[in-house]
Image (cartoon, helix red, strand yellow):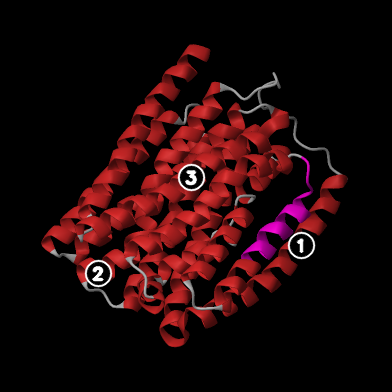
Amino acid sequence: MAIGPMFNYALGSLSALIVDEYGITEGQYGFILAAVYLSAGLTATFLGVLADKLTPRFQIALIFSGIVVAFLVSAMWQSFVVLLAAALIAGVAQSFSNPATNRLIAQRTSFTQRARWMGWKQSGVQMGLLISGLTFPFLGAALGWQTSALIGAAACVPALAIAWLIITKLERDVVSRPAPAASGVPDRGKLPTAVWLFSLVAFLNAVGTQGVTVYSSLFAVRALDFPLTVAGMIIGVIGVFGILSRIGWGRVAGRMARPSVLIQIMSLGGVAGLLFLIAAELFHQGWLMWVGILFHATLPLAANVIINSGTVAAAPAAKVGAASGLVATGMYLGFGAGPLIVGQLVDLTGSFTAGWIAVGVTYVASVVVAIILSRLHKSSA
């Protein structure tokens, strides 16, 4: 889960450098990030179906090797088109992450353990964010993007070898033990309405979270005059608090039968965080930005734990991969839309306020869908 988004988080932590080095606008930079997620979203549903059939080792190898290729392609030539091609490759590679890992959790853990394991699993994404935020700003400032990308590709190779060895050992151990009894809903040939609603919530939440995460570093440089290294470390701060919040909310979700209430709370927290970001730019106060980032990292950024836990619980036992792929499609399409919306509005208005307002609207819409999901759960109880 950490390796899948490593390429886009590397781009995010060096956003100001990429914009200057490649001679592109903020809107074009947003289009590159959007390409990653649109590519992932368009392939996630199909690859989610494959996740029910392919071995875990093969899927992990596809994720790792795809990110290596993306880094290498991006380092080939200092060109916007080449960077865009690398983004498309990275999107396909990381679209396997959620279906593959959700399938493993559904097969290997009991129903009562799933939310807690989902919290740890989803915190891997934030671990990637933390590693990127702590390394790439310094690599980029000293060596530029192309050399940093080569280092990123090289780091993925031993990580793949370690992951392969660990999964091989665990699969051998599991052969001698019976898997936990399946507790998903019976397979009736189609995905329940709740899964489709979770996919919609995933889309709306992702528009907001990725719009903020991708542009947080550039926002700090352009709107608040932060130096590149400090602004890049914002990604690391988001990663630290994202890890803690996802693990913590995973524990809370394990004790709650209905995830919709938590989704409402997290979405409203996202609105509050955006208000602080707007105030930070309006009054040119850096501390207001840090408060907004903390709201962002501890509330809406943790919603994927709740969404994935709810999806696994609602899906037919034989279609966890397919359901996870559908929800991942919503999430990745939202990830693509968020940076695109914010970037275009920054280009049009010259400030970030309009972009923050736009993604705030999606958080409000997420609250509405979560209320509908809550009523669906009550009617089916």
Residue 56 lies in the magenta stretch: yes
Q: At 65% from the left edge and 68% from the top edge, which residue is drawn?
A: 69
Q: Secondary structure at mark 1?
A: helix
Q: CA distance from mark 1 to mark 2?
A: 42 Å
- Viewer-proximal residue, 115 or 78? 78
Q: Do labels 3 and 1 touch, CB within 8 Å?
A: no
Provide the residue designation for mark 3: 333
What secondary structure is marked by label 2? helix
Amino acid type at mark 2: Arg
Is 22 positioned to the left or the right of 311 in the image?
A: left
- Taking the spot 45% from the left edge, 40% from the top edge, the residue there is 203
Please state the horizontal and vertical placement of residue 164, each as a whole percent of the image.
Answer: 76, 62
- The residue under the point 49% across, 19% down is 377
Identify the amino acid type marked 3.
Leu
Q: Earlier in the sequence, mark 1 or mark 2?
A: 1
Residue position for label 2: 222
Depicted 287 relative to depicted 307: above or below: below
Front-most of 200 and 103? 200
Mark 3 or mark 1, which has the lower sequence index? 1
Asked if the stretch drawn in magenta spans residue 73, the answer is: no
Task: Decide: is 50 above or below 245.
Answer: above
The residue most toward the bottom is: 142
Q: Position of residue 364 (x, y in %)?
A: 30, 35
Circle 2 residues within 10 Å: few <14, some 14–19, many ≥20: some
Label 1 crowd (10 A; few <14 / some 14-19 / many >=20): some
Q: Magenta: predominant secondary structure element? A: helix
- Up-down: is 318 above or below 1? above
* Category of crowding for the residue at label 3, using alpha-carbon neighbours closer than 10 angstroms: few (below 14), some (14–19), many (at least 20): many
Instruction: Where is residue 15? Give x, y as percent.
Output: 38, 69
**Highlighted magenta segment, given as a residue range:** 53-67
Mark 3 falls on what kind of element? Answer: helix
**According to the image, label 1 marks what residue?**
164
